[in-house]
């Protein structure tokens, strides 16, 4: 299992000024990858890598969220690597599959955010960690959306309202990192 791409992304991201929680998530994820050659597969029972997309509107005022069916909360779109070592490709694939968006634009090639979160046991699947590598994308909110079996709903949410839907620090952190709109109405993305 080729893990070098993920490690390179994480090490590059760690060179930025990160808060303590995200710095810890980066360190824990690098350590996890080193201990688990199968970290890109769901069959890695302690946890696995996921790729997700923080999708902003071109004006930077809204973000696309999914009301996750299994977890019952509003989140960014994303999912399991399933063996794919290109986590940006994973984030793009999952964003398209979970939203029906035909057109997405990568706003920065490196990581936008890193999070490590616990997924509770469900059915025959034991509780495990998701080591989530997140990317910043943009999409036009005028594109049609398709709610899939993984979601209860999809919605373009005003950036300032995200934490009212999900107050978790990892969501608040992505909101804080979202580039502000530029003067004259053109968004930073």
Image (cartoon, grey):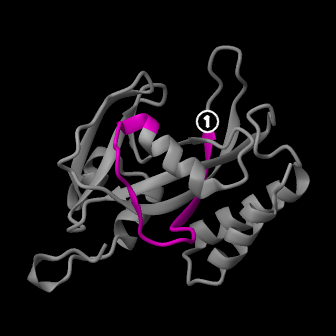
What is the x, y in percent for residue 40?
A: 76, 45
Quarter of the picture containing the C terminus is bottom left
Residue 81: name its quadrant: top right
Q: Which residue is mark 1?
A: 119
Q: Which residues are magenta?
A: 97-118
Which residue sits furthest front? 102
When asked about the image quadrant of residue 133, the answer is bottom right
Q: Nearer the viewer, residue 140 or 50?
A: 140
Element under disc 1: strand
Picture residue at 79% right of the left edge, 31% below the top: 43
**Which residue is the extreme one toward the left?**
184
Give the image location of residue 106, x and y in percent. Answer: 44, 64
Q: In the rendered picture of this protein, how many numbered marks are placed on residues? A: 1
- Name the residue: 43% across, 42% down: 96
Which residue appears farthest toward the top when viewing the image?
123
Q: Nearer the viewer, residue 123 or 50?
A: 50
Looking at the image, residue 8 sits to the left or right of residue 185; the answer is right
Quadrant in which residue 15 is drawn? bottom right
Instruction: Answer above or below: position of 175 versus 67.
Output: below
Task: Pinpoint residue 146: horizontal percent, then vertical percent.
Answer: 30, 31
- Which residue sits at x=39%, y=28%? 151
Residue shown at the point (36%, 51%) measured from the top left:
167
């Amino acid at each position: 299992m080729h893990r070098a791409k993920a490690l390179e992304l994480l090490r590059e991201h760690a060179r930025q000024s990160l808060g303590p929680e995200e710095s810890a998530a980066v360190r824990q994820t690098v350590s996890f990858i080193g201990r688990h050659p199968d970290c890109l597969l769901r069959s890695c029972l302690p946890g696995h890598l996921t790729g997700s997309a923080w999708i902003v509107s071109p004006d930077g005022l809204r973000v696309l969220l999914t009301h996750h069916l299994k977890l019952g909360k509003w989140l960014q779109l994303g999912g399991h690597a399933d063996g794919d070592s290109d986590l940006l490709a994973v984030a793009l694939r999952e964003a398209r599959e979970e939203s029906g968006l035909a057109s997405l634009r990568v706003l920065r090639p490196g990581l936008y955010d890193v999070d490590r979160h616990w997924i509770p046991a469900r059915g025959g699947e034991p509780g495990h960690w998701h080591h989530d590598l997140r990317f910043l994308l943009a999409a036009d909110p005028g594109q049609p959306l398709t709610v899939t079996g993984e979601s209860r709903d999809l919605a373009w949410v005003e950036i300032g309202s995200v934490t009212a839907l999900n107050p978790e620090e990892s969501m608040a952190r992505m909101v804080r990192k979202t580039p502000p709109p530029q003067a004259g109405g053109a968004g930073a993305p």
